[in-house]
Structures are given as structure tokens and as C-alpha cells.
Image: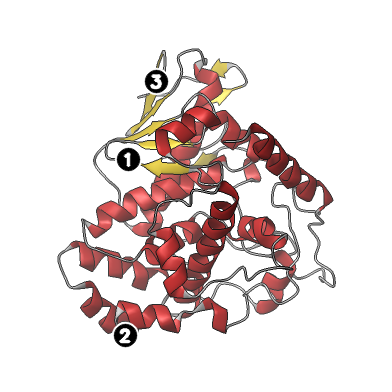
Amino acid sequence: MKHGLIVAVLATAAAMAAASDTTAAGATADVPNHPALLAPLSPASTFPRFTAAELEAAGYPDHLHAFTYPGYAPLTDAAGETYGPLSLASGTRVLERAGLVCAPGEIRYRGLSLRFNPGYEAHQMLPMVELLDWARRDLAVLLGHDRGDTLRVESPDDLEAYGLRTGYGFHRLYRMLEDSVVIEPAPILMARGLAAHAAHHLVAVWLLQDLAAGATLPAWLVQGLASYLAEDGTHFLNYLFMHRADRPVILAPGEAETILASPPEADLATDVVRYRTAGYSAFLMVWELVENRGGLAAVREMFTRAGRGEDPDAVCRELYGAELAALAASLDPTGRPEPVGAAVHSRSPQRPPRR
């Protein structure tokens, strides 16, 4: 991996965030104009969740940066226990919590294990544990499913070590191996503002794989649903903004499936664009599926019943009126406008909403 390319990409992302205006042109006072102001996904959500005007003004929902906004406080579960960012560490101080074990090179907590270079202090890595725990708690509720085993995550020393361990570039934020999930180094994910998204995406895939129990489901469905649950949409918009002038950024289902199910391209620059366009295309397919064709309950039933041994095509036909291949064709994102409207503009969910 070329150090100069990484620096250039990160600098470009920072420049886009700095230049981005969170208020869409023409937005009115009663229309949310920031991704964090849109209603969050919940088991009680009514679909579709948003009007066209709301999506055009705010972009896709993104609530995963709120812990960086002024006035943030940790989340609280039904038992009154805090969780998420700032629940396990405050500055350099590790907060006492039942079940939290901090050892050199490893932190264990509530069915999570994060391994890292023992040169890091626990308080430096606890923010990643907080994000993973947040993702697991909330996604288990949304999917109606949790796992009984331990989620084992490794954070390599740097991007070079990450590439050697996974074969992935910086744009692919983690790789699931047989016995663990290797993430892009946690400090880098935090610095890029992507740690919460990476945590939610990998936990979603980890839970969905268990829910499906070995059933073969298409990559666009698994990856697209993970991106939907991880609220990746606005980041896809920002990543692909620079490419819209010279190439399509939305792919047909077959091409998106091939890319998502295949190893990375040898050329890093090529893989960056192909992987992100395929990811956005799968996200759009699942957005249509969940928001406009049955909500989260139907797609969750698809995974659940396939995991019980039912034929996925038969389940899909019962739920959606078509087998998986035909369903994918009907969800082709190249044949419909983007939910956020034709005048796509960059947005910065890292910035707090304007009040």
C-alpha cells in the first residue's frame, strides 16, 4: 500500500468534510436537514420512514457520529446500564464495569474480545470496544437475534500490517477470517470517523451469518443489509461524489454481486471505485427492499427461515413474490432515481446539526 496514496485520500476526505454544508439548498425549517435529525431505525419503525423531501434535504440517515456532538451522554439499556461511547473509559481513566477485563494486548467484555499491540494502553482501545458493544446490543434487537459465542476482533499495528494480514486496502474496513475479524487499525478508523460504521457493519454481517446458519444468500443482500443497518448511505454519497462526472456510480445487480463476492482487484485505485460503487448499489437495493417492500420484518424472516433449512428461493417467493434472482432484477438501482434525489450533494454527518 502506497503511503502517499493513503495520505492523499485522507486529506481529500478531510477537505470534503470541511467544505461540506449540512444544510441542503431550499430546505425549510420543518424538514430535517442533517442525517442525524432523521428518525432512527427501531423495531417499531413504520416504512417507508421518510418523505422524498426529507431525504433530499438531509441525505440518508446517520446517527453514528452523535457521540462526537456537544452534549452527548452514553446510551442506557432497559436495565439502566450505560453502553456505547464514553461508557467504559473517560479520557485516560478506565471505568469500572462488571465483566470488563483489560489485559496487555487484549480487552474482553460481554462476549467481545479485542486484541491489539500490547504497547497500547487499555484506554486507547476501549473506544473501539464501546462501539462494538453498542453495535451488538442495538443490532441484536433490530435483527431479533444474538449469538452465544465470542466476537473476536484483531486490530493490527498499522495499514501495512492490515494489508498483509487481510490482502485489503484502506477502503475495505475489515475482513472476516475463520476465527476472527481483522479490522483496519482502530486508531485509524477512529481518526477517519468510520469506526462506528465499521463496528456496526461487521457486527451486522457476523449476526446475519449466524442467523442464516450456512444458507447461501447473495452477497448483495448480506452486504447491502449490513450497510443499511450501519447507516453507510451518506458516506457512500461523499465517497462517490468525485466520480459522478466521469463514470456511473450505480451498478446493475449482477455486476454488484460479482464485485462483492470476488477478491479485491490487484490495482488499488480500481478496487476502491469498484468496491464502493458495488457497496452503494447493494445498499440501494436493500433500501428499496426494506423501505418500500415489507420493512425490516420481512427481510429478517428471509434470513431466519433460510437458517432453519427452508429453501431460500421458496421463502423469497412467499415473502416477495419472486425468487432471489428475479427479486434482485426487480431491485435494479440503475432503473430508479436515488432516494436522496437527483441533485446529489456532499454532506458531513460528522458535524453536529445546525440548530
Residue type, label 1: Leu
Q: Looking at the rendered structure, which numbered label has been put on residue 322? A: 2
Earlier residue among tags 1 and 2? 1
**How is the protein colored in the picture?**
secondary structure
Q: From where the camera sits, is residue 77 visible?
A: no
Q: Residue 291 location in percent, x, y?
A: 50, 74
Earlier residue among tags 3 and 2? 3
Q: Secondary structure at mark 2?
A: loop
Q: Residues within 10 Å of mark 1 (few under 14, many from 20)?
A: few
The residue depicted at 78 percent of the width and 57 percent of the height is 22
Q: CA distance from mark 1 to mark 2?
A: 33 Å
Q: From where the camera sits, is residue 65 visible?
A: yes
Q: Nearer the viewer, residue 16 or 253?
A: 253
Q: Is residue 30 left or right of residue 318?
A: right
Q: CA distance from mark 3 to mark 1?
A: 18 Å
The residue depicted at 47 percent of the width and 42 percent of the height is 168
Q: Residue 99 location in percent, x, y?
A: 35, 24
Q: Which residue is mark 3?
A: 106
